[in-house]
Image (cartoon, rainbow, N blue to C red):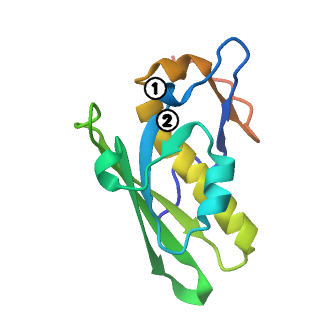
């Protein structure tokens, strides 16, 4: 099944030289049946959560489909609005049957963070973000052909 393209990227925020305010944040409506919204909101604090999709700049629609053996593929559609009108794409996260509920929630949050990067990159808040790669493999030495 489909897996997330870059499973080891973690989005981290750094607020060393900048005081983040609610005006700097993107308004997001998260349409995610079955998600633990309290967990998501606790883990992703760099956006405002809109209660009404009409007040959101980014509408995230999460749908899930079961796979064999109690697994699931979660499809996350990121739909830009209000200044992000041309931004629309989909990411997928596959929850393996061996994952705990916490691991599934962590994977979903990681995928949500990755999907929010292109939107945040277009705002003033982008200068306060760092991306880090966990478990990064060392680059292979290139051998000149010739």
Please name the residue that numbered disc 2 is placed on: 117
Residue 145 visible: no
Asked if labels 2 and 1 touch by Cβ distance under 8 angstroms, the answer is yes
Q: Is residue 16 above or below residue 88?
A: above
- Can residue 3 be seen in the rendering of this structure? yes
90 horizontally vs 137: left or right: left
Q: Position of residue 132 (x, y in %)?
A: 69, 32
- The image shows residue 25, relative to residue 35, as above or below, that is above
The answer to whether 15 appears left or right of 120 in the picture is: right
Mark 2 burial class by Cα count in 10 Å: few <14, some 14-19, many 20+: some
Q: Residue at x 43, y 46 (%)?
A: 28
Spot occupied by residue 129 in the image (x, y as percentages of width and height) = 61, 25
Q: In the picture shown, does residue 141 fall above or below 1?
A: above
Q: Secondary structure at mark 1?
A: loop
What is the quadrant of residue 60 in the picture?
bottom left
**Which labelled disc corresponds to residue 121?**
1
- Residue 19: % across, % down: 65, 18
Q: Please, what secondary structure does the residue beneath circle 2 have? A: helix
């Amino acid at each position: 099944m489909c897996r997330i393209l870059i499973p080891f990227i973690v989005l981290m925020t750094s607020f060393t030289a900048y005081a983040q305010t609610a005006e700097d944040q993107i308004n997001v409506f998260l349409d995610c049946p079955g998600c633990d919204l309290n967990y998501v909101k606790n883990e992703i604090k760099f956006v405002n959560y809109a209660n009404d999709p009409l007040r959101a700049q980014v509408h995230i629609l999460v749908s899930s489909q079961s796979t064999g053996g109690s697994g699931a593929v979660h499809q996350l559609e990121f739909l830009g609005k209000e200044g992000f009108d041309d931004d629309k794409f989909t990411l997928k996260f596959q929850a393996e049957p061996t994952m705990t509920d916490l691991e599934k929630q962590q994977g979903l949050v990681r995928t949500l963070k990755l999907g929010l990067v292109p939107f945040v990159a277009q705002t003033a808040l982008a200068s306060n973000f760092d991306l880090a790669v966990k478990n990064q493999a060392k680059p292979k030495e290139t051998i000149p052909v010739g």
